[in-house]
Image: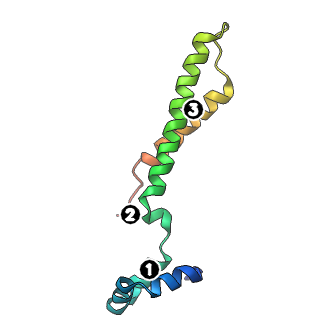
Amino acid sequence: MQTTRLIDVNTLTEKLTDESFLQLAKQSPEMAVKSITENPLNSDKWIYRTVVAILGVISLTALVGGLLLAYRSEPREIPQMLVALGSTAVGALAGLLAPSPRES
């Protein structure tokens, strides 16, 4: 069963006025349709970089904050929320940076 994706009217209007897209549509209509319906999470590297940067900042902030709290507080206890944020961010980074399995 084939699924269809809705295309935003503004995106379609922009593509139909783009000369390079029209050339692609003349040469390979399948590739032109694929370029319109492509998921931006797969093609836009800035989304990936932004997520990795934010998770890295959260991890480093949790580490530095935990160290500061451990040295400044008398019972030397790190709040559980800080530990949870740090470990979740590190786990998310590991999941993003691990290579995805490929079909053979």
Q: Which residue is mark 2?
A: 103
Which quarter shows the N terminus? bottom right
Which circle marks residue 34 in the picture? 1
Instruction: Please provide percent x and percent y for residue 13.
Output: 52, 85
Which circle marks residue 86 in the picture? 3
Residue drawn at 47 percent across, 79 percent down: 36
Q: CA distance from mark 2 to mark 3?
A: 33 Å
Q: Earlier in the sequence, mark 2 or mark 3?
A: 3
Circle 3 Cα neighbour tier, 10 Å, few/some/many (<14 / 14–19 / ≥20): many
- Residue 26 vs 103, above or below: the answer is below
Residue drawn at 63 percent across, 32 percent down: 84
Residue drawn at 57 percent across, 29 percent down: 62
Which quarter shows the C terminus? bottom left
Taking 43 as reference, is 73 left or right?
A: right
Which circle marks residue 8 in the picture? none
Circle 1 Cα neighbour tier, 10 Å, few/some/many (<14 / 14–19 / ≥20): few
Instruction: Please provide percent x and percent y for residue 95.
Output: 48, 46
- Residue 94 vs 7, above or below: the answer is above
Residue drawn at 58 percent across, 21 percent down: 66
Kind of residue at badge 3: Gly
